[in-house]
């Protein structure tokens, strides 16, 4: 009887450890309350890096916002970007399908004072600023993606391989909103922009820019 009880307890303990591990590989950070709903900072830390053959998907209230796929020897550990909070509450969910067939998922929600209304038609812009050094790739852009716009694709080439990214209209873009103090890089009087940052094992990266909606 004692042996059987021990076996049951061991099984329960093992299950709890497995559950904790499978849900600790992704950490999502969102502000507790959203005031600037068109420019919501989101931080995604990956305790299990995504690599060649893996695919990361970001959903906002069950709608696709972004996908990321690294290739060759690229390994990514963190994504920082800005999304649009279109509902109250707004729920961000990250799903990862690994090359070995295993899956990871995590979600986080935040309250929204005034949900963002995505325009029907986006305004394409050729403006963007791109920088990559010491394993961190940063990009700011002006494009205001609309509901009727096609997904926007980006392709980065690094010294470790390439990275493909797809944006939808749930990603932020310039809309006339002015910077505020809740953003670290805020500059008084400047307009808010779309923002995207990757951390990985690469030392340098370059891009030909956007295609599809951005019309380079």
Image (spheres, rainbow, N blue to C red):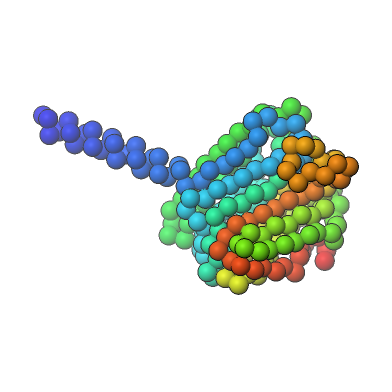
Q: Quadrant of the C terminus?
A: bottom right
**With respect to residue 57, does 181 lie above or below?**
above
Front residue of 121/35: it is 35
Q: Residue at x 47, y 61 (%)?
A: 99
Q: Residue at x 84, y 59 (%)?
A: 127
Front residue of 191/165: it is 191
Q: Position of residue 129 (x, y in %)?
A: 79, 59
Q: Is residue 112 visible?
A: yes
**With respect to residue 21, does 134 lie above or below?**
below
Q: Position of residue 122 (x, y in %)?
A: 84, 50
Kindly indicate the quadrant of the structure image that contains residue 76: bottom right
Q: Residue at x 68, y 48 (%)?
A: 81
**With respect to residue 171, does 86 lie above or below?**
above
Q: Quadrant of the N terminus?
A: top left
Q: Position of residue 187 (x, y in %)?
A: 83, 44
Give the side of residue 4 with respect to residue 103, left or right.
Answer: left
Kindly indicate the quadrant of the structure image that contains residue 60: top right
Q: Position of residue 87 (x, y in %)?
A: 70, 32
Q: Residue at x 86, y 52 (%)?
A: 123
Q: How many marks?
A: 0
Q: Is residue 147 visible?
A: no
Kindly indicate the quadrant of the structure image that contains residue 33: top right
Give the side of residue 191 with respect to residue 212, left or right.
Answer: right
């Amino acid at each position: 009887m004692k042996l059987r009880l021990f076996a049951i307890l061991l099984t329960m303990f093992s299950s709890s450890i497995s559950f904790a591990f499978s849900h600790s590989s992704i950490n999502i950070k969102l502000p507790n309350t959203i005031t600037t709903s068109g420019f919501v900072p989101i931080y995604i830390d990956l305790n299990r890096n995504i690599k060649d053959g893996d695919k990361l998907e970001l959903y906002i209230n069950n709608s696709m916002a972004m996908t990321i796929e690294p290739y060759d020897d690229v390994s990514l550990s963190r994504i920082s970007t800005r999304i649009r909070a279109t509902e109250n509450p707004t729920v961000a969910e990250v799903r990862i399908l690994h090359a070995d067939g295993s899956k990871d998922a995590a979600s986080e929600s935040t309250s929204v004072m005034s949900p963002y209304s995505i325009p029907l038609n986006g305004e394409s812009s050729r403006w963007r600023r791109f920088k990559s050094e010491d394993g961190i790739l940063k990009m700011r852009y002006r494009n205001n993606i609309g509901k009727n716009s096609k997904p926007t694709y980006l392709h980065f080439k690094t010294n470790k391989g390439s990275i493909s990214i797809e944006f939808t209209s749930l990603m932020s873009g310039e809309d006339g909103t002015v910077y505020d103090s809740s953003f670290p890089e805020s500059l008084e009087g400047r307009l808010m922009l779309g923002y995207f940052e990757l951390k990985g094992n690469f030392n340098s990266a370059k891009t030909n820019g956007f295609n599809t909606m951005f019309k380079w």
